[in-house]
Image: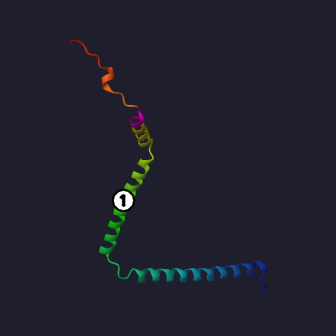
Amino acid sequence: MYISIMDQILLYTSLGIAILALIIGYYAGVRVGKFIESTQGLEWDNIANITGDLATLKKTIQTLNNRINGMHSPKVMEQELIAQMLQNQPKQSKSNNVTHIGG
């Protein structure tokens, strides 16, 4: 029986792919087993608590980011500049601008 080179290439390639698929399937099975084992004692109440904690943490981080971004906004810098200018202005006394009329 005569087997051509192309037939041998196809045979060994398909054998290699089958072995690779077997190894990947075994690896996936091991990962699923580890996942099931690690979530064995986890109940829905725990998952609900974790979800609530994550939502609270997310809201806190958003609030903090908004505060940090607000510190660098142009409005705050302009307000600080105006406050400095008002403090550094020479104070004028009101008595200089008053004129007395009558007796």
Instruction: Give the extent of the magenta segment.
Output: 85-89
Q: How many residues crowd around disc 1 within 10 Å: few (fewer than 14), some, or many (20 or more)?
A: few
Picture quadrant of residue 7: bottom right
Going by the image, does 31 lie left or right of 101? right
Point out residue 62 in the picture as x, y percentages from the top left corner. 39, 56
Point out residue 97 in the picture as x, y percentages from the top left corner. 32, 20
Picture quadrant of residue 99: top left
Give the amino acid at mark 1.
Thr
Picture quadrant of residue 27: bottom right
Going by the image, does 35 lie left or right of 44? right
Q: In the current view of this chain or complex, which residue is farthest to the bottom?
A: 1
- Quadrant into which the N terminus falls: bottom right
Is the residue 24 above or below the residue 70 in the image?
Answer: below
Is the residue 37 above or below the residue 59 in the image?
Answer: below
Question: Camera-side residue: 7 or 83?
Answer: 83
Tag 1's secondary structure? helix
- At a point 70% along the width and 82% down the height, the residue shown is 12
Is the residue 33 above or below the residue 50 in the image?
Answer: below
Residue indicated by mark 1: 60
- At a point 62% along the width and 80% down the height, the residue shown is 20
Point out residue 21 in the picture as x, y percentages from the top left corner. 59, 80
- Quadrant into which the C terminus falls: top left
